[in-house]
Image (tube, coloured by chain):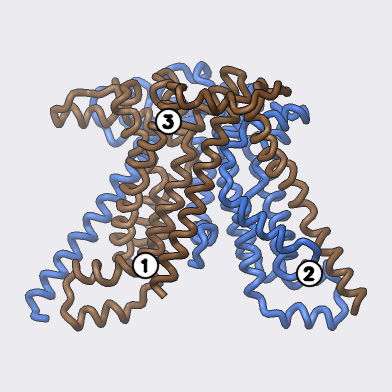
Chain colours: A blue, B brown
Amino acid sequence: MTATTARRLNAIGLIITVITVFCAIIWAFPLYWAVVSSLKPEHEVVRPYIELWPETFTVSHYVFALTQTEIGRWYVNSIVTATAVTVLTVSSSLFCGYAISQLNFPLRNVLWWLILASFMIPMQTLIVNHFELVADLGLINTWSGIVLPQLIHPVIIIVYKQFFDGVPKDFREAAVMDNASEWRILTKVYIPMNWGVTTALSIVCFIWSWNAFLWPFLAVTKTDMMTITVGITQVNDAFGVYYARQLTAAVLAGLPVAMAYLIFQRRVTEAITLSAGIKG
Amino acid sequence: MLRNRRNEGLFGLALVAPFVAIYGLVFVYPTIKLFMTSFTDAPLIGDGNFVGFDNYARLPSDRRFGTAVWNTAYFVLITVVPGTLLAFAIALGVNRLAGRLQAAVLALFFLPYILPVSVVYLLWDWTLNFQFGIAMYLFDMLGIARIPVFKSTAWFMPAVGMITIWWTAGFSILLFLAGLRTIPTEIYEAAALDNAGRWSTFRRITWPLMWPITALVLTIQLISQLKIFDQVYLFSVGGRPNDNMVLVYYVFQRAFQSDQGGRAAAVAVVLFVIVIVVSVLNFQLTRLSGGRDR
């Protein structure tokens, strides 16, 4: 390769890099634009030209949203339901994945095939019957009603099973020789060696549940029981046609998951690649 | 020893019991019930009379169902392949970067994916707002006439498709990046020694090696876009929901707005079957092509 072609290739490489960075900035611009708009007074927001920085900074929309609207209540609903979904789903999946991977029990293979098959089933098609079920149980407009149909994520069991499959059999045999009870083997040997996966899956499960729209939207008709994801789209009269206030609500609803991602970036990407079936 | 094995079996059953209970209640039971309901004239809550295949027989001549099928197919067409190719291109760009810059750029592309659909809706409803949206100022500057995007039938699906690509590309980018990292650098070094150009390196090495991941991303995208509802519903509020109808939306409308659980269930069964058929076909196809490669 001659020096000139090498230099030309480097120039092309540099151009691609610049384009990539430029595209990333454009890509995230709507996010920036929403945050900036939420910090402007309403009359600045509707000015007919583009101002990338507020002339006067104001947090008044945030004060309004947190004190004059039901957003605080929706936060509580979202935190409670997403936490419940996460704890119940991850723990039941962990136990199930461990049992299928490490223990012999009747109908084990049938259960495994059922879980693999259910991976394909579209939950959205079950809304009618979920609604009837939850209504029959008297759980419409309750936290339990929001939580119940969200408790199945076959993919979490599959990830756990693959992880436990990767643990050498010697661990279990050594523990059995020591006369350790089954429960001790699980809690003292297997769970501690998988904390990383458990953390990653829990964060992702929490984000999924926080972001869930269709079911929480159907399960709740009273504004005070809505999750924040549903609430900010349903109660327009609380905000009127004040664009800045609506964007403030959007920022408040997105902030917790965005923060969770930025803090646990590595874990989140790990769990998402794992759940797509690739060991990343 | 025998006691041990019985213990193991009992313990195993005890461990799977919570999952199996939930699974039966919110998965198996509703699935069976869905098929049964689709043969009745039941309202949303409560039982109905058995009507045989009536609910299904009505579908071919049901105009709104036709719109829903067409729009769902249209939406799949404009999002799945373009979204996957765009994500691949972005992943190639991001993969060239290193260290902090790569982490920062990846975060910018990935952030939208982490946000709830309602936030995405409010963001874009604002960005494309007919009166004050920043996109409309850009249109003005470029001399293009303003478009009431979400009120116009022609622009609705393309706009929601574009927003969906923006929203979900981060996920595909992540998968492509994971795949690109598994390609050994030796292969590229060998190609460079052979004086292979940028394009032929991509076409002969990167593309074929990445094909399994591309197929995976395409499948995940296809299946999730068949089930589209949230964005279409949110952007349709105050617009023309019946023109923008998609399959899940139609299930929702029949069940929750017309109180016709039986007819809604029939539509849901159709979608259910489509998704299962696509999944199985795809599974078989990847298995076949995987076998050929080996």
What residue is drawn where x is 53% and y is 36%?
A: B270
Q: Using the rendered view, name the quadrant where residue B127 is placed.
A: top left
Secondary element at tag 3:
helix
Residue A75, x across and y down, in percent: 61, 35
Residue type (three-letter) at the residue carrying disc 1: Leu
User: Whole-percent x and y of residue B1?
Assistant: 90, 79
**Chain identity of mark 1:** B
Left or right of A15, for residue B10: right
Q: Are marks 3 and 1 in contact (CB under 8 Å)?
A: no
Picture coordinates of residue A260 (x, y %)? 53, 50
Label 1 packing within 10 angstroms: few (<14), some (14-19), many (20+): some
Tell us which disc is closer to us: 3 or 1.
1
Q: Residue B16: x and y, percent?
A: 77, 57
Q: Name the residue under label 3.
A: B122
Label 1, label 2: how many angstroms apart (C-alpha)? Answer: 39 Å
**In the picture provided, is B275 more to the left or to the right than A1?**
right
Residue found 63% across the figure and 24% down from its top:
B261
Disc 2 marks a residue whose amino acid type is Asn
Q: Callout 3, which amino acid?
A: Leu
Which element is circle 2 on?
Answer: loop
Rendered view: A11 above or below A234: below
Q: In this figure, which residue is indicated by the disc labeled 1? A: B180
Determine the secondary structure under disc 1. helix
On-image quarter of the N terminus of chain A: bottom left
Q: Which chain carries label 2?
A: A
Q: Are marks 1 and 2 on the same chain?
A: no
Viewer can see residue B44: no
Spatial separation of the CA atoms under disc 2 and disc 3: 51 Å
Q: Which residue bears the numbered disc 2? A: A104
| Relative vertical location of residue A138 with respect to residue A252 in this rendering, above or below | above
Q: In which quarter of the image is residue B13?
A: bottom right
